[in-house]
Image (tube, rainbow, N blue to C red):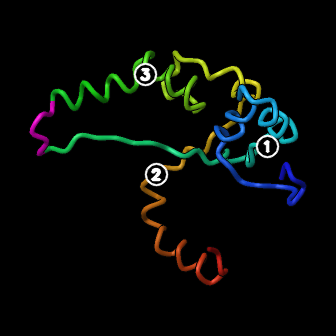
Amino acid sequence: MAAGVGDIAISNTYYLARLLASDKPEERAIGEKLGVFFPNQGDRGTHVNISGAGVLKSAPNKDNAVKLLEFLVSPEAQRYFADISFEYPVNPAVKPHPVLANFGEFKQDTLNAATFAANSLEASKIMDRAGWK
């Protein structure tokens, strides 16, 4: 898009945030040519990718596994995700990086991720018929 090859792209916001926060002027210049649009704000909200984790019932070290998960949602770890990875923190006590905050607030889709799995086969068939690669 920055090269003028296309008018619209679907991307994770952290890619644009990385450009805008770059130490390299040429990368910031690319980011400044682009904008963010959050679709479906009038109804279901925009899709948000998730990173999930869990602990198996059979985990041999369940207590430490839970401690790791608790750490990952702590303000310290979430600050890393916000400031280094340019991802939106899951912990509401941690504010997004200022670059992300400048994209504005948005309504996120609350569709349960289990629905994705239940429909993945049909979605794959549709993508195959459409020729999506």
Q: Disc 3 marks which residue?
A: 77
Residue 113, numbered label:
2
Q: Is residue 11 above or below residue 133?
A: above
- In the rendered view of the protein, which quadrant contains the C terminus? bottom right
Please report the residue visible at 19 percent of the width from the left and 44 percent of the height from the top. Answer: 56
Q: Nearer the viewer, mark 2 or mark 1?
A: 1
> What span is in magenta?
58-62
Instruction: Report the side of 62 relative to 109 (left or right).
Output: left
Name which quarter of the figure residue 59 lies in: top left
Q: Position of residue 90 (x, y in %)?
A: 50, 29
Frontmost residue, 119 versus 5: 5
Q: Nearer the viewer, mark 3 or mark 1?
A: 3
Check disc 2 and give the amino acid type. Ala
Name which quarter of the figure residue 103 lies in: top right
Please report the residue visible at 43 percent of the width from the left and 22 percent of the height from the top. Answer: 77
Q: CA distance from mark 3 to mark 2?
A: 23 Å
Q: Secondary structure at mark 2?
A: helix
Q: How crowded is the residue under tag 3: few (<14 C-alpha within 10 Å), some, or many (20+)?
A: some
Frontmost residue, 116 versus 98: 98
Check disc 3 and give the amino acid type. Ala
Q: Is residue 60 magenta?
A: yes
First in sequence: mark 3 vs mark 2: 3
Q: Disc 1 marks which residue?
A: 37
Q: CA distance from mark 2 to mark 1?
A: 23 Å
